[in-house]
Amino acid sequence: MNMLIFIIAGLLVHCVFLASIFDIYFTSPLVHGMTPQRTPLPPPAKRLVLFVADGLRADALYELDDNGTPQAPYLRNIIEYNGSWGVSHTHVPTESRPGHVALIAGFYEDVSAVAKGWKENPVEFDSVFNESKYTWSWGSPDILPMFAKGASGDHVYTYCYTAEKEDFGAQDATKLDTWVFDHVKNFFHAARSNQTLFSKVNEEKVVLFLHLLGIDTNGHAHRPNSREYKDNIRKVDEGINDIVSMLEDFYGNDGKTAFILTSDHGMTDWGSHGAGHPSETLTPLIAWGAGVNYPQKVTSQFFEDDFLKEWKLEKWKRLDVNQADIAPLMASLIGVPFPLNSVGILPLNYLNNSAHFKAESIFTNAVQILEQFKIKMTQKKETTLSFLFTPFQLLSDTEQINILRKARSYIHQEKYHEAVSLCKTLISLALEGLSYYHTYDRLFLGISVVMGFVGWTSYVILLIVKTHTGLTRSTHDKASTVLLLYGFAAIGVLIAFFLLIQTCPWTYYIYCLLPVPVWYAVVKEFRVIQDLASLVLVFPLGQSIGFLLAGALGIEILVFSFFYRSTLTFGLIAFAGWPLITRLWTQAKVTTLSWTLLCLLLAMFPLMPVVGREPNISLVTVAGLVILLISSLSLACLCKSKNKYVPKKDLTILLFQMLSIALSTYVVNSTHSSLHHKQGLPVINQIISWTTLASSLFVPLLSPTFFFQRLLSILLSLMSPYLLLSTGYEALFPLVLSGLMFSWIYMEKEVLQHYGDSLKPKLAVLNFSYTTDITQFRQLHLDDIRRSFFFVFFIVTAFFGTGNIASVNSFDPASIYCFLTVFNPFVMGSLLVWKIVIPFVLVSCAFEAVQVTTQLSSKSLFLIVLVISDIMALHFFFLVKDYGSWLDIGTSISHYVLVMVFTIFIMLLSGLAQLLTTKRIELWGRTKRHSM
C-alpha cells in the first residue's frame, strides 16, 4: 500500500475511533416533544433575582478571615437570620457555560458543546429564562447571549459589557461587577419614569439575572488566596446588599421577591478550573426572600467533610444540592413551568410553604422528568426491531400509571409526606430509565469499535512483517482473494440492511461497517499469517513468552504513567541502566555517562509539582541564560572549526536565534512585572511574543541541514516561544529533554556499531537532506521494537513530564499572558496546545535522526509506533466510564481522547519532523557546502 494512502486511511480510521467515544458514551441527553409542567398552586414569589458569582468557591465565601470576620458580612447575616444555605455540587467540566446551563436549564451539558467553546448552543434547550414572563440580565457577553438566543419570543433582554473588558491584566477586575451593579441601578431608576418598562418589571414570573465575572477574572490573574480575590468577594457582598435594598424600596417591600446567590464553578488554588477537584466542584448556594425557608438551627449534623467546623456554621442547617436542582427551585418559587429538559430534583428543604404546595411541586417535578423518560423510550422503541427491544423493566407503562395514581391519591387524602416519598421514588426510577435508554446501544457499538480496533492493529502488524522484515515470501492467490472480497461485501450489505430497517443514525453505519474492509485486508494476508505462525512455533517457547511479557509490561508502564506521573521516573531510571545491561558502557564511556546522567536528570521532572501551581519566573530566566550559554558555545565551536567552512548567513541565523532567546527572556520578566504592578500587558511585549511565535517554525528552515546544526536550530527556535509560555521550572524541561535526545542519537549509533550492523561515520557530517536513498535502508530487527518503544515513552514523557495535561486544571492561565490577557478560549487553548507540542516536535526530530543514523526507513519504525499506541488506545477504550465520581469520569474520557489524538498526531508529526529536518529555504541564493 502506498504510504500516502496508508496515512490517509489511518487518519480516517483513527478519527472514527476518536469520534466513537462520544457516540457511545456522551451523546446529547436532550429529547424534545414534552409538555410543559407547572405547579397548580399560586407561587410564593412574583419575581426572582439570581446572582451568579462566576468562579466563587464555597470555602472562599463561607470561611472567616484570620480575625474571625466573615469574608461577606451581608451574606453571612442572611445565612444566620434570613435564609437557607448549603453547598451546590457542580459537575465536570467545571466551565462557565456548562455551569450556567445546569443552573438555569437544569441539565448537565453534553460534550458536543466543547466544539462551540462552551458558548453557543449546540442543541436547543429550554430554561427558566425561557419559561419566565420577562428576564433581564446583565453581565458577560460570553454567557448572556446563549440564553437569549435559545429563548422563544422576545422576552429575554441582555445588557453586556464588551469582551475587551475581560482582561486578566487589568488594573481592577472588580470593575466588571461594579458595571453590573451600576447598570441594574440605572435600569430601575429609568423604570420609574418609563411607564411601559415600569409595568413590565411589576409583572409576575419576572427574573433578574446578575452575572458577576470579577471574582473569576481576579482568581485567574491573582489566585483565589490573593488579596484581590478576597477584596472582590467583599465588593460583591456590598453590591448585593445595595441591589437588595434598592429592589425592596422599588417594590415597596411587598415581600414577593426571592433571591438566590450561587456560582457556576469554583477554582483551584493555582487559578484554573475545568476538572473535578473539590475546589472546583463545591460552590456556595444561599437563598432568601419570598418562599424560602428561614435559618434552621440544629444541634448536630453530619457531612463527610469538615467544612462546617472550619466555617463556624455548625449551628445552621446545611442543605446541599446538585447544581441542576437549582433550576426547579427557581421555577417553583415564581410559578413557571419546570424547564423541559431539566433533570434536577426540587430541594424541598429550601421551600417555606405548605406541605400541600411541596407535594404538588414535587409531583410536577416527577411528571416533568417522566415525560422525558417516555419520549426517550418511544424513540428507542421506534428504532429497534420489536423482537430485539428490551424495555426498562422497573418502570413499565402499568407501573408509571400506578405510581402517578397513587401519588395523586395521597395528595387528595392530604398524606403529603407519603406523596413526596412516592414522587421521589418515581423521579429516581425515571432518571435511571433515562440513563438506560440513553446507553441502550452502548454494548453493540462498543463491540463494533473494538472489532475495528483489533482488525486495524492486526493489519498493521501483518504489514510490518510482510514489507519490513523479510520473514515471509508469500504471494496472493487471486481466486481466493476474489472469493473473500465477495464474502466480505455480502457481510457489509447484511449489516447495512440491518441498520437500515432500524433507522439507525448515519454514524452507526460507519462504526459497524468499518471493521468489514479492515478485516478483509487482514484475512487477505492469510498466507502471511500462516508464515508468521510457522515462525512463532519454531521460536523457543521461553523466549516467546519472555518477549510477550516484556512488551505487555512496557505498554502497561505507558498506560500507568497516564494515572501516575511518577511511573515515568521509574522508567527513566531503568533507561539509565540500559547501557550497563547491554555492556555498551565498555564501548562508549562518555556517551553512556551523558545518557545516564540526562536520564536521571529528566527523571526528576515528573516528581515535581504540576506546572503553574507555584510560578517562579526566575527559573524561566535561568533557562533562557542556559540556552544562551549553549548556543554561544555552539557558535564558538562553529567559528573555530578548521575542517568546515561556515557561511556568514548561517552564523547570522544563529545570532538571530540567540537574540530571539534573549528577547523572550526579557519579555517574560517584563510582562509579569507589569502585570504584578497592574499596568497591563505592554503592547511591544505582545508584538515581540507573536512575532517570535510566528517565526519559530520558519527560521529553522533557513539553517544548514547538517545533523547537529539543524537540530540545534530547531531547539533554539522552539525554545523562544516555549520561554514565553512558561511560568516556572518547566522552562528547563525542553533543555534536559533535548540533551537526552542528542545523547539518544549517539547511543543508537553505538548500538549498531556494537552489533556490527553499521560503519561508524561521524554524526557531525551526516546531512538530513542526503539520507533518502532507499537502497541504504535495512530490514527491521527485534531491537527496532525497543527503539520505537523509546520514542513512545519519550513522547509520553513530553506529555506528562511537567504536569498531567489530561486534567484541564493543570494549565496555568498565567502562561499565556505574554500573548494576551483578554479572555479568548480558542486563542488561549491554541497557545497552550502549542506549548505541549513543542517537546513533541523535539522528540520527533530526534527520532527522525535516529532513523537516519540506524539506516531505517521512517515508515518501518512509524508502523511499530502505531501498533504500540493503538494497543494503548484500546486499553483506554475499555477504561472509559460514565459512572463513579466526576473526576474519574473526566479522567477516563481525557485519557482515551489524549491517546487517540496522540496516535493521529504522530502521523502528522512525522511529516512535520521530516519538513523541519530535511528542507531548507535559500533566501540569499545557494551556497557551496564544504565538509570533511
Image (cartoon, helix red, strand yellow):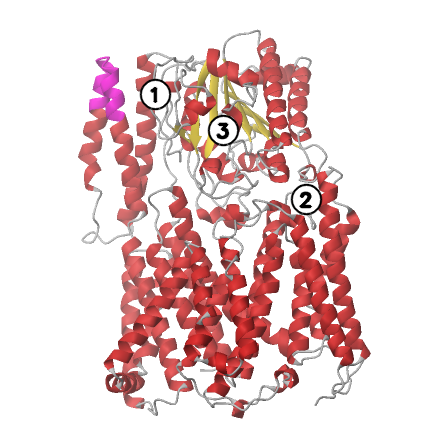
Q: Is residue 25 above or below residue 661?
A: above
Q: Which mark is residue 821?
A: 2
- Residues at marks 3 and 2 touching, judged by CB atoms closer than 8 Å: no
Q: Residues within 10 Å of mark 1 (few under 14, many from 20)?
A: few
Q: What is the x, y in percent for residue 201? A: 58, 17
* Residue underneath mark 1: 301
- Across the whole image, how many numbered discs are drawn on residues? 3
Magenta span has 418? yes
Give the residue type at disc 2: Thr
Helix, strand or loop for the magenta stretch, by majority: helix
Q: What is the x, y in percent for residue 110? A: 43, 45
Depth check, mark 1 against mark 2: the one in front is 1
Q: Is residue 521 above or below residue 422?
A: below
Image quadrant in which the C terminus is located: bottom right
Magenta span has 615? no
User: Residue drawn at (35%, 27%), measured in percent from left and top?
Assistant: 303
Q: Residues within 10 Å of mark 3 (few under 14, many from 20)?
A: some
Q: What is the x, y in percent for residue 46? A: 49, 15
User: Residue drawn at (42%, 47%), measured in percent from left and top?
Assistant: 890
Q: Please tell me which of labels 1 and 2 falls first in the chain.
A: 1
Q: What is the x, y in percent for residue 775? A: 52, 92
Depth check, mark 3 against mark 2: the one in front is 3
Give the residue type at disc 3: Asp
Could you tell me which secondary element the residue under label 2 belongs to? Answer: loop
Q: Which residues are magenta?
A: 406-423
Image quadrant in which the N terminus is located: bottom left
Q: Is residue 793 left or right of residue 636?
A: left
- Residues at marks 1 and 2 touching, judged by CB atoms closer than 8 Å: no
Q: Find the distance from the CA under tag 1 to the CA under tag 3.
A: 18 Å
Q: Nearer the viewer, residue 449 or 261?
A: 261
Q: Please tell me which of labels 1 and 3 falls first in the chain.
A: 3
